Image (cartoon, rainbow, N blue to C red):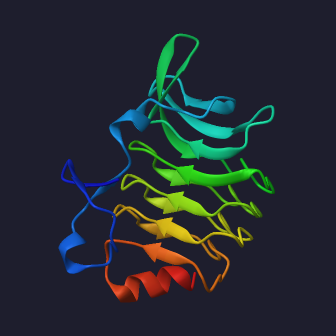
Amino acid sequence: TTFKNGEAYEDRNLLTDDFSEIYRIGNALYDVYETPGLVYEILDESDKTCALAGKRGDVSGEIHVPSYKTIGGVRYTVIGIKAMAFSGDSSVTKLITNDGLKWIDDEAFFGCTSLTEVRISSTVERIGDRAFHGADALIDVMLGRGMKEFGSAVFSAAEDMCIYYPGNQLEVEEIKNY
């Protein structure tokens, strides 16, 4: 489900004029839901921030990045996905980020050949170089309005890939060509 100003909207092409406002991708339940087996790195004790650093064990399928993670009884805001966190992992099929996430670092999902769908919340401002490059099965990418910085070669040039972005068509073409 896609949300606009807190209200649910039906699934539709996000490139329409009616959907040019800032929106939130996700579901309130996902703010606290996370995929079990993910590994986090504390970034700043005083700010209570951490980043998703990868996974352990046989975690596969959908990766749900929560807004918060409790580590040692302390609640941390998840603000990023570290460089190469899932690089080369062919078991990841879908990525869903939630409010609070600010960045996805270089090559975070590089070569994730089974990744087909990515939903990036409107709080994400930066996606690093080659973050999803080599994810050749990637078909659906939903980007939030908060995007300010795109690295180089973020996506492979897959012909089937649809990028949903609440900007204009020219912005979408620019994103595809990065």
Which residue is drawn at the image coordinates 38% and 52% (left, top)? 123
Which residue is drawn at the image coordinates 49% and 60% (left, top)? 126
Which residue is drawn at the image coordinates 20% and 47% (left, top)? 6
Q: Position of residue 161 (x, y in %)?
A: 57, 78
Q: Position of residue 154 (x, y in %)?
A: 62, 71
Residue 47, image quadrant = top left
Between 96 and 170, the residue placed more toward the observer is 96
Q: Position of residue 138 (x, y in %)?
A: 63, 69
Q: Residue furthest top?
A: 73
Taking 80 as reference, is 18 above or below it? below
Could you tell me which quadrant the C terminus lies in? bottom right
Which residue is drawn at the image coordinates 54% and 33% (left, top)? 34
Between 97 and 13, the residue placed more toward the observer is 13
Q: Position of residue 26 (x, y in %)?
A: 38, 48
Between 81 and 47, the residue placed more toward the observer is 81
Q: Say whether residue 21 is left or right of residue 134.
A: left
Q: Say whether residue 142 is left or right of residue 38.
A: left
Residue 139, image quadrant = bottom right
